[in-house]
Image (cartoon, rainbow, N blue to C red):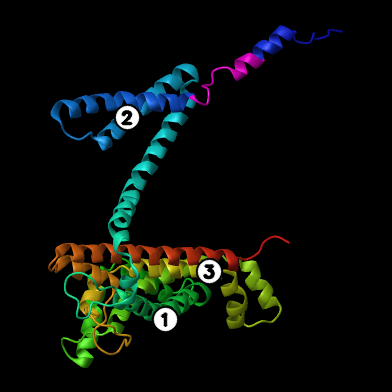
Amino acid sequence: MTTIAPPAPNAISSSRASLSSGHMPRWAPWALLGVALLVAAAPFGLSAAASGSEFNIAGSLIVGALLYLAIIYVTSRIVEGQRKALDRFITGVVTSAFLVAMVPLVSVGWTVISNGVARLDPLFFSSSMRGVLGEGGGALHAIMGTLTVTLAATVISVPIGLMTAVYLIEYGRGTRMSRIITFLVDVMTGIPSIVAGLFAYAVFALIFGPGVRMGIMGSVALSVLMIPVVVRSTEEMLRLVPNDLREASYALGVPKWLTIVKVVLPTSIAGITTGVMLAISRVIGETAPLLLTAGFTDAMNYNLFGGRMQTLPVFIYSQYAYQGIPAEAYVDRAWAAALTLIVIVMVLNLVARVVAKVFAPKTGR
């Protein structure tokens, strides 16, 4: 009988060494990145020193990133092999793309904050521009107008969008009418905002005559832009509800409409709320439709059906486009209003996340 001898200890240790070898240390990619950035910054620094101009930070970062991708690929291929080298290269490309995408966001945020925070004083939030020429004044009328017009647009859009999505998923799935509605919703998604403003203006001009301007007109224009977003987001959330929940409700003798109200909608309420908040954030900064419909004014107006109503986007436009003396006061008010609008959108998104977390279905016991 032939017996197989166990492997020698030297063979085991050599195999373990071959499996654990060929790996770069964790600090190596960061060191290579630093070297690449230094090498790329050197010619830009010498050129700036020779010509007396400013150092090109963006150019040095771009060249440094490209140089790092080449260095990390070559180094990793020599040390770790082709497979790991390609993985590190793709990781570097994805990370670079993410950083490039973050540059405009960070730049816009920093610019608005640095230029608008100086004018965020109590006067800005407690007064309007009525009778103000030059310095002083505030945007209370624009803030209240934005909140009022957007709230009215939400009241119009959410029921229509919600019921349309319920019809598409629960009642009309696969029918010809549902396909037509889906096509129209897709078309409405790509409508330019100025077209929505012209539509609202034309409808109210036929009723009240040419030249009419009211806050409710702006709400109708914004609702045209909001409805397809609400329909799409609600439709996707309703599709995620398991059919087992519907069938269990039907098996207990619950009618379909009550199943939708008591089972389907509560299950997807978190996603629906998030979609509604995103729709509000999408339209709250529109300028063109509000400029055509709600117009602009320097006085307070809380009545949606009575005269012109100022909103923050139109306030920003008017302050920057029609500068008086001193011009710095108008520009400062425009930057402060822009920062206020960003804060409102940020608060709405935070509220959407909190609501989604609180009302999300609990899956654990």
Tell me, yes or no, whether the two marked residues, 1 and 3, touch with CB atoms within 8 Å.
no
Residue 194 percent coordinates (x, y):
22, 71
Residue at (34, 69) in percent of width and height: 283
Q: Amino acid at mark 2?
A: Gly
Looking at the image, is mark 1 or mark 3 nearer the viewer?
1
Residue 287 seen in this snapshot: no
Residue 357 percent coordinates (x, y):
57, 63
- Looking at the image, residue 271 sits to the left or right of residue 41; the answer is right
Return the residue at label 1. 155
Residue 238's disc number: 3
Return the residue at label 2. 64
First reached walking from the N terminus: tag 1 or tag 3: 1
Residue stretch rendered in magenta on the structure: 16-27
Q: Amino acid at mark 1?
A: Val
Helix, strand or loop under label 1: helix
Q: Amino acid at mark 3?
A: Leu
Towards the viewer: 196 or 72: 72
Residue 106's disc number: none
Residue at (32, 78) in percent of width and height: 145
User: Is 22 in the magenta?
Assistant: yes
Towards the viewer: 344 or 177: 344
Above or below 153: residue 101: above
Q: CA distance from mark 2 to mark 1?
A: 51 Å
Binning the other alpha carbons within 10 Å of mark 3 as few (below 14), some (14 to 19) or many (20 upward) gives many
Above or below 337: residue 80: above
Helix, strand or loop under label 2: helix
